[in-house]
Amino acid sequence: MKALCWHGTKDVRVETVPDPKIINPRDAIVKITSTAICGSDLHLYDGWNPTMQKGDILGHEFMGEVVELGSGVKNVKKGDRVVVPFTIACGSCFFCQRTLWSLCDNSNPNAWMAEAEMGYSPSGLFGYSHLTGGYAGGQAEYARVPFADVGLFKIPDGLSDEQVLFLTDVFPTGYMAAENCDIQPGDTVAIWGCGPVGQFAIRSAYMLGAERVIAIDLVPERLQMAKDGGAEVLDITEVEVGEALKEMTGGIGPDSVMDAVGMEAHGFGLEGFYDRVKQAARMETDRPNVLRQAIVACRKGGTVSVPGVYTGFVDKIPMGAFMNKGLTMKTGQTHIHRYLHPLTERIQNGEIDPTFLVTHRLPLEQAPHAYEIFKHKQDNCIKVVLKPGQVA
Amino acid sequence: MTQNIKVEKTVTINKSPEELYRFWHDFENLPRFMKHLKAVEVKDAKRSHWITSGPLGGSVEWDADITEDQENELIAWKSIDGADVNHSGSIHFKPASHGSNSAAPNANRGTQVKVVMAYNPPAGAIGDAIAKLFGEAPEQQLGDDLRRFKMLMETGEIATTEGQPQGQ
């Protein structure tokens, strides 16, 4: 099959590789019909994760058709159209039973690596380095899905690929981030980052009863898309964000703040953490500013929601502000499985049409080009959907 | 150069002590999740024959006896006198939460499983082989073995990526 393989910093190639096969009884093979590039793929692309290996297949936002099933998968059948959550979960451990799917105890074969860094390991993830399992990803024609009996979600009739594709990651991620804001009637939510997660967070915050959403970014087309979603917007190149937020909220501050940017420049490995962090910090000094700024801007007693991806240490977090203002922080990889049914219902009810996000549709063969325009925000690129099997 | 190796590790498994005790008690199951064990043959209620991988594709073998057996609580075993390898081990099963409060179904956290293993390799080639096998990061080896035991018991399989496709 054709698959997008990582070969090094800014070096991804579409190659012919062997087709995946069933390895464990609870596996399924999915023939991929649509697969997206995620903002978090970019820090693998940019070479920040030292647990990537040459030849790793990227991609964790994919869907398609079931073509093969292990003996232990009974709830779907060949030919079913399914979406695949990017977090891999067994369904039977302590964490899965508490719907903390992204913290599954049993899906990361390289848990020891994550334990060395974090004390305990989160779940395995598709196409996202060896730290989270080294699973082959879904920017390919086919993918093997472990624990398919728990992960595969059968798509109701009448919904197109692009309506449901973002259930794999960015829609639930934005939604959970909004839930993590603990929104009360009358609340104002400030969201840093108007990428795909920020866009869904804006719309989800309104679904969850926010009165106002203020979205913060610097890319014109992203700010426009945020406005289209009902947000008031701040362009960081034009205003001092903290002051502007204070003014806009009558001097109180936003009730909750969200870091939908993350510290994407700060991926690093198991050895020599600190030096690499320092090095990264020098190179990307603006990145941790989002979390710092959000903590300082938040009203007293408010909530800080962090869907943005962090992988290591951050310097100079204003813990004094965080403690003395009595803030709460909520974060985590998304418990995708928890949101599949309720968010599909919202799509079916017409409360949201996730297709608003798609700016580019390209054949899988053009994935290297797609990474380039996505990374450099060229051609107003916000979200790329790749179509395996489509002629280049 | 040989050294005595003793490691101890605890893992919580979301299954009852009964289920875990029963599975482990059949030592022939152990190679399914213990990386260095090639095979265990149970000879009778007490005695078993253990085969681990050795250097150059060879193997190291010994007989062991169960020395203590308390149903659903404890199994201990030890290599017999005169065996090439002086090995002993024990596994302890303890409910991870006390009592059963039906108003709090999440209070049941399964079973705390503690495993203690010791190898006292003799001088000479076999000792060197054993020291080499178990001497490198023995804590992590036992930890990995127990993680695979937990996966197998909780999910029926062991998560792996071996055999998946990859680019050149």
Image (spheres, rainbow, N blue to C red):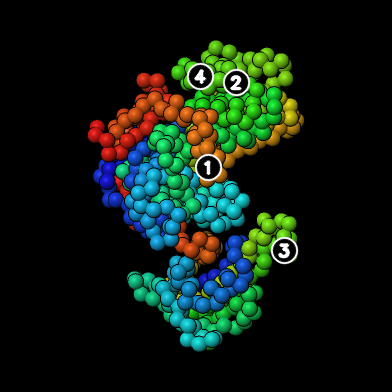
Q: Which mark is residue A341?
A: 1
Asked whether the residues under the numbered discs 4 and 2 touch, taking CB atoms below 8 Å apart as contact, a structural biologist would say no
Q: Chain of mark 2?
A: A
Task: Identify residue type, mark 1.
Answer: His
Q: Which mark is residue B100?
A: 3
Q: Looking at the picture, does residue A241 appear above or below residue A124?
A: above
C-alpha separation, residue under disc 4 versus residue under disc 3: 53 Å
What residue is at 57 percent from the left and 57 percent from the top?
A93
The residue that mark 4 highlights is A228
C-alpha separation, residue under disc 4 versus residue under disc 2: 12 Å
Name the secondary structure under disc 2. strand
Of badges 1 and 2, the one in the foreground is 1
What residue is at 43 percent from the left and 33 percent from the top?
A163
- Is disc 1 surrounded by few (<14), some (14 to 19) or many (20+) residues within 10 Å? some
Name the secondary structure under disc 4. helix
x then y, percent, for residue B108? 67, 60
Q: Are marks 4 and 2 on the same chain?
A: yes
- Is disc 4 surrounded by few (<14), some (14 to 19) or many (20+) residues within 10 Å? few
Q: Chain of mark 3?
A: B
Task: Identify residue type, mark 4.
Answer: Asp
Name the secondary structure under disc 3. loop
C-alpha separation, residue under disc 1 versus residue under disc 4: 26 Å
